[in-house]
Amino acid sequence: MTDPALSLLPPDLRQSPTALAVARGTQRLLGSLGFSSLPELALPSGRRADLVAMAADGEIWIVEIKSSIADFRADRKWQDYRLHCDRMFFATTPEIPAEIFPADAGLIVADAFNAQILVDAPEHRLHSATRKALLMAFAQTAARRLQSLADPQWRYGEMC
């Protein structure tokens, strides 16, 4: 059964249909592993991660979605994401060769319906101050997104 709240979400026109499909399958995988995830989360550095996932114990994963070889080659900002997570993954389609991705990051292969981890990501534990900042950003962003679903006329920061 589909969550009725999901039908209220506006389409994300910044992403290609392929990237959206990979994100959906990856979020399903993350949920099955006990993680809650948010797409397009602003990090304390000012970068925006494709997916940030948080486990009940506070472990944080970042997943960078790559929908094509050209997408991977054109974008190097993902190297900064390691400073904001305990584990860093790439997620892509089965058509993209796994060999193009760095060996020091995890790899998830996904479609719109499911995903699997092909390469587990090495752990590099976050500094406690960075973890706290990310946990706060994750919670505040999730709360704002839920509030805007419940009250579409409400805008963050405006007084009623």
Image: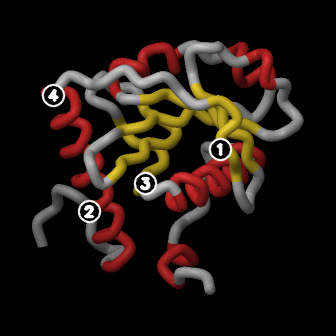
Q: Amino acid at mark 1?
A: Gln
Q: Residue at x 23, y 44 (%)?
A: 135
Category of crowding for the residue at label 1, using alpha-carbon neighbours closer than 10 angstroms: few (below 14), some (14–19), many (at least 20): few
Category of crowding for the residue at label 3, using alpha-carbon neighbours closer than 10 angstroms: few (below 14), some (14–19), many (at least 20): many
Q: Amino acid at mark 3?
A: Phe
Residue 26 percent location from the top left of the image: 62, 50
Label 4 vs 2, first from the N-terminus: 4
Circle on res. 128: 4
Category of crowding for the residue at label 2, using alpha-carbon neighbours closer than 10 angstroms: few (below 14), some (14–19), many (at least 20): few
The reply to whether the C-beta atoms of the residues labelled 4 and 3 are less than 8 Å apart is no
CA separation in Å, label 1 and label 2: 23 Å
Report the residue that reaches farthest toward the right. 95
Tell me which corner region of the image, top left, top right, bottom left or bottom right, holds residue 74.
top right
Residue 108 percent location from the top left of the image: 66, 38
Image mark count: 4
CA separation in Å, label 4 and label 1: 32 Å
Label 3 vs 2, first from the N-terminus: 3
Circle on res. 15: 1
